[in-house]
Structure formats: C-alpha cells, structure tokens
Image (cartoon, grey):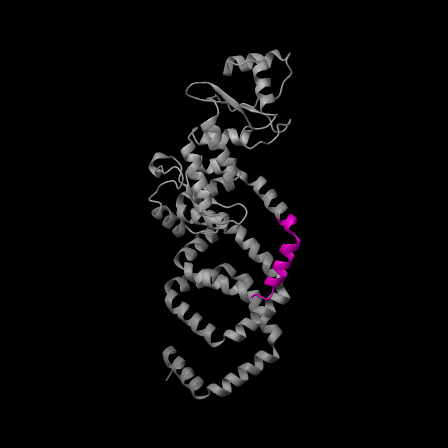
Amino acid sequence: MKQTREERLAKRRAYRIAHRERINAKAKEHRVKHREEIRAKVKEHRVKHREELLTKARVYRDNHREEVTAKAKEYHLAHKEELSAKAKEQRIIHGEEMRAKSRERYVVNREVALIRAKKYRDNNKEKVSLAFKKWYKTHPRIEEHKNWSASNKDKIKGYGKTYYAKNKEKRITYFNNYKKCYPDKVKNTILKRTYGITVDQYNQMFTSQNGNCDICGKNQAEFKRALGVDHNHTTDQVRGLLCIHCNFVLGFAKESAINLKAGVNYLHNIQDTEDNDEPLRCATPNDTTKNNYLKRNYNITLEKHSDILLNQRNQCAICNDLFTPEIVPFVDHNHTTGQVRGLLCIHCNSMIGYANDDPAVLNNAITYLNKYS
C-alpha cells in the first residue's frame, strides 16, 4: 500500500531522531569538506533573493518580536566572550568596509536613526549615562585621545569655528529650541561652567537673601533680569547675588573698597554736577566745536573745563588715574540740578551713575566687599 505524505514525513522524522548523532557528524564532515562551495551557493542565493529574504525576516521579527529578542539575549549571554572576540576580529579585518557601510546606511536612514536614538536616550537616561562613563573610563584609547586633544587645541577650535560658520543658523535655532525645552539644564550648565555652582546652590542663596540684592536691598520683582552671581575675579570665590546695577558698581570700582570710599567722599564733599556718557577729550582753547558742545550740554565753557582739569592736576577726581588719550575725562554732573561737579574717568563715572548718585549704595558695597574679604 502506498504511503501518504504525512506518513513519509513522520518516518523520516523518527529516523533523524534515532540517528541524530550520526547524521550531525556526517553533515559536519560534509560542511568542512565543501565549506567554500556551500558558502558560495548560500551567498549566491542571498544575492539573488535578497529582497524576498529580508521581507520574510522582517515579517517574522515583527510577528515574533518578544520571542526573537529573548532568544537573542539568551544566546548573547551564553556566548558573550566568543561573540566579542569575533566582533573584534571582524572590526580589525573589515574595519574600513564596515565604517563605510555604516556611514552609507546612516545617510540613507538619517532621520529614522536620529528619532530612534533620541527615543532610546529619553527612555534610558541613567543607563546611557552609566554606559558612557564606564566606556570613557575603560576604553584603551581614551588617554591617546586626551593627549591628542591637548596637543591640538587650535586645530579643534578651527574645526569648531568652521562648522559653526557653515551651520550658523542651524546651530542658533537648535540652541534656542534646546533652551526653551530645558531652561533649568541650560542655566545649571552656565552656572557650573562660569561660577562652579549648581542651580540648587543658586536657589539656596536666593532664598537666604529673601530674593533681594545683597547691596541695595531691592527685590527681584523690581528688575526684569534675574539677580546675577557676583564673584571675586582673583580667587573665583562666589560672594552673593546682586542686581545688574550693583554688579556694575563693583565692576567699575575694580572691586576696590578704596575706590568706593573715594566715591562716597566725592559725592559728600564736592559741588553738585552733571554727567554725560559721551567721552570728552582734552581740547585746545580754539576748539569751537568742543566749546559749543560743553555750552550746550553742561552750560560751561572750554576755559572752565580746562580750569577744572588743571585744578584736578589732570587726574580723575575719584581714583586719581591720570587722563591720557586712552583714558579721557568725562564731565560729571548732578542729574537733578544740572550742576557740574568735576571730571571723572569712564570707570568712576559709570560707578557713580549705576549707584544713582547715592552714597548709601557705595557704603553698602564697601560693607559687602569687606564681608567677603
């Protein structure tokens, strides 16, 4: 009686089970003997039916994703060292070819790859951070990379500038979007890089000062900009949070209590004056344009300006720096009465201006500097 297809298959299956070891040994012997021929046929078949095979594999993975992932993990754990050694060997032998294929694949699927990478990073932040730190500490070429970076700083800066010049609009747009999405992170980075403190430390200082400037005492609500971090430019020690005006007062006073005290004395003792931020250079008596400028803005003549300069011995009335073509005298005046008080350098003039002509602000600044000296 003729056997059915199912019976024949069952008989073959039973035979293979009963003689598995002998069949496997023969198959292995055949593969070793005809390795190149088998590989060539397999490669030819793959090339010929590539799209069909890829589609079938993709469909199977999509339908059995969890099973495939579990099996892959299990196999990887069981053969970790062997797979790592093979991968390393392949990278050494076919490094350039693999990199070229990787670049080509990335160019073709760039958008998909970026979305996938971002999604993975967002879902595995701690894992990615730990993996990078571990790689950075253990990678054998890190020291080589550090040494190269240290000896090629100008070259790296050149690369960065060239890239930024070519992609300026793109970089600005990216940073603005990043700043909107992660304002705290950006603020923390800037504080850490510039002053060596974190956002939490900034918030603690802000709370301890009750949200007020540490010199003039005005509250944050009175300013459009956030209170700035003040630090010693010599030691980099962070001192406190100041409004922009008080921060400028310290800067223009060169962080010197002596200059601030001289400013206090100047405001207390000298006659009321008037100030303008436009520089006023030393002029000759026949300078008609300068004379007209002084008459129009300060109601003094060029001769009066020269007399003041002579009385001050060609020095700033506060810091006593000599006036030169680089350090020009500014006419200081009382903004309420318009009366001229003297001639100051740009730093002292700005210091008085940002203090709103208030000796109390300068005294507070002196106390503030002494507290952290």
Q: Nearer the viewer, residue 87 or 233?
A: 233
Asked if residue 83 can be seen in this view, the reply is yes
The quarter holding residue 60 reads bottom left
Q: Is residue 94 left or right of residue 260?
A: right
Q: Is residue 229 visible?
A: no
- Residue drawn at x 50%, y 47% as measured from the top left: 194
Q: Quick one: 276 or 63, which is closer to the camera?
A: 276
Inspect the magenta stretch and tell me whether residue 250 lies in it.
no
Count of numbered labels shown in the rendering: 0
Q: Position of residue 249 (x, y in %)?
A: 47, 35
Predominant secondary structure in magenta?
A: helix
Range covered by the magenta-colored residues:
139-156
Q: Nearer the viewer, residue 344 or 30?
A: 344
* Residue 47 occupies quadrant: bottom right
Check residue 149 for magenta coloring: yes
Residue drawn at (37%, 63%) of the image: 63
State whether residue 283 is above or below residue 195.
Answer: above
> What percent of the width, then of the height, locates residue 50?
52, 61
Q: Residue at x 45, y 31 (%)?
A: 354
- Give the vertical position of 364 relative to 294 (above or below): below
Q: Quadrant of the N terminus?
A: bottom left
Does residue 60 appear left or right of residue 43 in this picture? left
Q: Is residue 276 above or below residue 39?
A: above
Residue 138: x and y in percent read 55, 67
Give the percent coordinates (x, y) of residue 180: 40, 43
From the viewer's perspective, tell me whether residue 119 is left or right of residue 137.
left
Give 306 or 174, whichever is nearer the viewer: 306
